[in-house]
């Protein structure tokens, strides 16, 4: 298995030795059984879980505070990613490829796209997994990527070690896609949510549990996009601009909130559902699961 050792923090913050300011790194990560355990996810500031063809899931890991030496397996981009990543300032997007009609939109988006072939030696096959679940990335070979800026802060998240008022005790939550599911179980000892995927413990490449300090179940509009995969299945599009219900999980409690993102270039805020103050996240990694809005109405 491939370990996830991290590059050291640049002493000058998010600036390369050349003096050029770096961008946050977003990597599209495979999430079917054959791709697990993934490498580098435990270094991400934010992990987004989104629905793809066939009701399966795929992950978008965003790195800022730490940049792992290796990340993967890397898979292809979707239209959902372009709207999602607009809230960051010209991030670097690493992905394995894209549907032909989507490529012009990626090239026109305000981000730095680096699929295989765009950076010498950045991608390699390995990890003892079958293709296509064995494509990995060495971020250091992309150039312009270094540790420094926290991706959660860049996304507009508010953090505080103080536990927010209100909420209700909750120590387990499961979110279901048509053909995938995510579970989060609170560990008081670790003060983290233990991540599970498709009924199994989610592990790092080194065999440790994947954890989150905060979990957000964000209910969004999921509709068919204009694009499809090579088998002809329509790609879902999760709309992350707008507003709606969300449940924020931290410190063994659940907080009913309303998420708001007024425009593609804006960050996402989460305020108490009763119209109160913003709900602060616990310091540490955040997992955001984009659940279909109709699920919220059934709960």
Image (tube, rainbow, N blue to C red):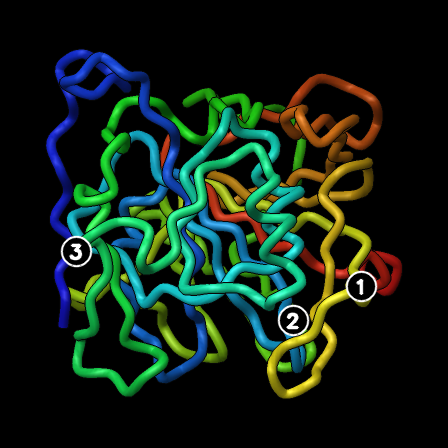
The quarter of the displayed image where residue 164 is located: top right
Q: Which residue is mark 1?
A: 295
Instruction: Please tell me whether residue 16 is drawn above or below residue 268 in the rendered image.
Output: above
Q: Is residue 214 left or right of residue 44?
A: right
Asked whether the viewer can see residue 136, the reply is yes
Q: Which residue is mark 3?
A: 121
Quarter of the C terminus within the rendering: bottom right
Marks 1 and 2 in Cβ contact (< 8 Å)? yes
Instruction: Please tell me whether residue 279 is drawn above or below residue 102 in the rendered image.
Output: above
Q: Position of residue 203 (x, y in %)?
A: 28, 67
Marks 3 and 2 in Cβ contact (< 8 Å)? no
Of 240 and 208, the residue lying toward us: 240
Q: CA distance from mark 3 to mark 2?
A: 37 Å
Marks 3 and 1 in Cβ contact (< 8 Å)? no
In this rendering, the count of numbered labels is 3
Residue 176's disc is: 2
Q: CA distance from mark 1 to mark 2?
A: 9 Å
Of 128 and 246, the residue lying toward us: 128
Q: Secondary structure at mark 3?
A: loop
Q: Secondary structure at mark 1?
A: helix
Q: Nearer the viewer, mark 3 or mark 1?
A: 3
Instruction: Please tell me whether residue 188 is drawn above or below residue 205 in the rendered image.
Output: above
Q: What residue appears at the point 39 percent right and 56 percent down from the top-left corner?
A: 115
Residue 228's disc is: none
The quarter of the displayed image where residue 167 is located: top right
């Amino acid at each position: 298995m491939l370990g996830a050792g991290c590059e050291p923090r640049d002493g000058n913050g998010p600036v390369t030795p050349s003096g050029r300011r770096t961008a946050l790194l977003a990597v599209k990560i495979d999430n079917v059984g054959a791709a697990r355990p993934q490498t580098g996810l435990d270094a991400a500031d934010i992990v987004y879980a989104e629905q793809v063809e066939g009701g399966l899931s795929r992950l978008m890991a965003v790195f800022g505070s730490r940049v792992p030496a290796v990340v993967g397996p890397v898979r292809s981009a979707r239209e959902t990613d372009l709207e999602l990543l607009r809230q960051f300032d010209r991030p670097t997007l690493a992905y394995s490829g894209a549907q032909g009609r989507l490529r012009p939109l990626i090239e026109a988006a305000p981000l730095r796209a680096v699929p295989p072939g765009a950076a010498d030696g950045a991608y390699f096959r390995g990890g003892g997994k079958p293709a296509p679940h064995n494509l990995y990335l060495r971020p250091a070979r992309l150039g312009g990527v270094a540790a420094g800026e926290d991706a959660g802060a860049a996304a507009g998240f508010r953090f505080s070690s103080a536990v927010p008022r209100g909420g209700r005790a909750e120590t387990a939550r499961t979110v279901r896609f048509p053909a995938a599911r995510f579970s989060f179980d609170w560990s008081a000892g670790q003060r983290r949510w233990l991540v599970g995927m498709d009924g199994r413990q989610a592990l790092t490449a080194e065999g440790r549990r994947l954890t989150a300090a905060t979990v957000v179940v964000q209910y969004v509009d999921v509709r068919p996009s204009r694009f499809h995969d090579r088998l002809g299945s329509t790609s879902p599009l999760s709309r992350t601009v707008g507003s709606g219900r969300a449940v924020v999980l931290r410190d063994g409690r659940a907080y009913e909130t309303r998420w708001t993102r007024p425009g593609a270039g804006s960050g996402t805020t989460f305020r108490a559902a009763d119209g109160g103050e913003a709900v602060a996240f616990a310091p540490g990694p955040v997992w955001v699961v984009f659940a279909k809005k109709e699920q919220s109405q059934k709960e």
